Image: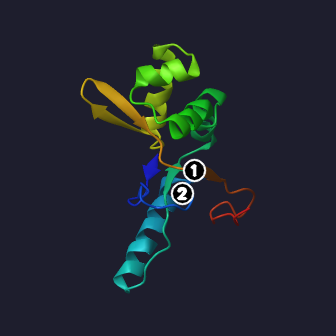
Amino acid sequence: MNQDSNSRPESNSTAPTVLTVRVEPDERFVDRSIAAVRALDRGERPDEYHGVSLRDADELGRLLSANNVELLRTIAREEPDSIRELCRLVDRDIRQVSDNLAELEALGIVELQQDGRAKRPRFEYDEIDIRVPIGDDAETDPAPA
């Protein structure tokens, strides 16, 4: 998993914030990053982009599991103060929720902020846009839906 440097949204924005998840090899991520830096060097401002790159469909499948989607929706909607509070909200065991959160954190999707003895789960997005190249042209970005 790779995370673009400007992947966290600014919390003062009122527009919906979209997390773009791309399935792409590491080389493609590096190429896009280099292109963005070169554009900055030319004085151009790249489009605002909040995203992560996943290496393969297996990582994407883990992200999109029913349990993970439920956690993301609950975190975004309820803004729980701790993992234990999140467990109560989704009516699941703390071990299961902790495992799912660790996976989502490793993928760069959620952030676990230390708050005293508790960890506060954060997901600051309104939508997830999934981009998966298909077919012979798999090395280029797919057109937005």
Q: Are marks 2 and 1 in contact (CB under 8 Å)?
A: yes
What residue appears at the point 39 percent right and 30 percent down from the top-left corner?
81
Element type where label 1 sits in the image: loop
The front one of 80 and 68 is: 80
Tell me the colour scheme of the image: rainbow
Q: Residues within 10 Å of mark 2 (few under 14, many from 20)?
A: some
Residue 127 image point, x, y percent: 60, 50
Q: Quadrant of residue 63?
A: top right
Number of numbered callouts drawn: 2
Q: Position of residue 59 (x, y in %)?
A: 57, 38
Q: Quadrant of the C terminus?
A: bottom right
Q: SS at mark 2?
A: loop
Dot 1: few (<14), some (14–19), or many (≥20) neighbours within 10 Å?
some
Dot 1 amino acid type: Asp
> What x and y, as percent, mark residue 17?
54, 57
Q: Tell me the tag on residue 126.
A: 1
Q: Quick check: 127 left or right of 6?
A: right
User: Which residue matches tag 2?
Assistant: 17
Give, as a three-letter code, the residue at label 2: Thr
124 and 53: which is toward the camera: 124
State the image quarter where residue 10 is shown.
bottom left
Q: Position of residue 7 (x, y in %)?
A: 43, 56
Name the foreground residue: 50 vs 27.
50
Q: Residue at x 68, y 63 (%)?
A: 142
Q: Residue at x 43, y 66 (%)?
A: 33
Q: Nearer the viewer, residue 101 or 23?
A: 101
Q: Which mark is residue 85?
A: none
Image position of 115 (left or right of 34)? left
Residue 133 lies, with reference to residue 67, above or below; the image says: below
Furthest residue to the bottom?
Answer: 42
Q: Give how far apart the Cα atoms at labels 2 and 1 are.
A: 5 Å
Q: Return the disc, 2 or 1, that comes first in the chain's sequence.
A: 2
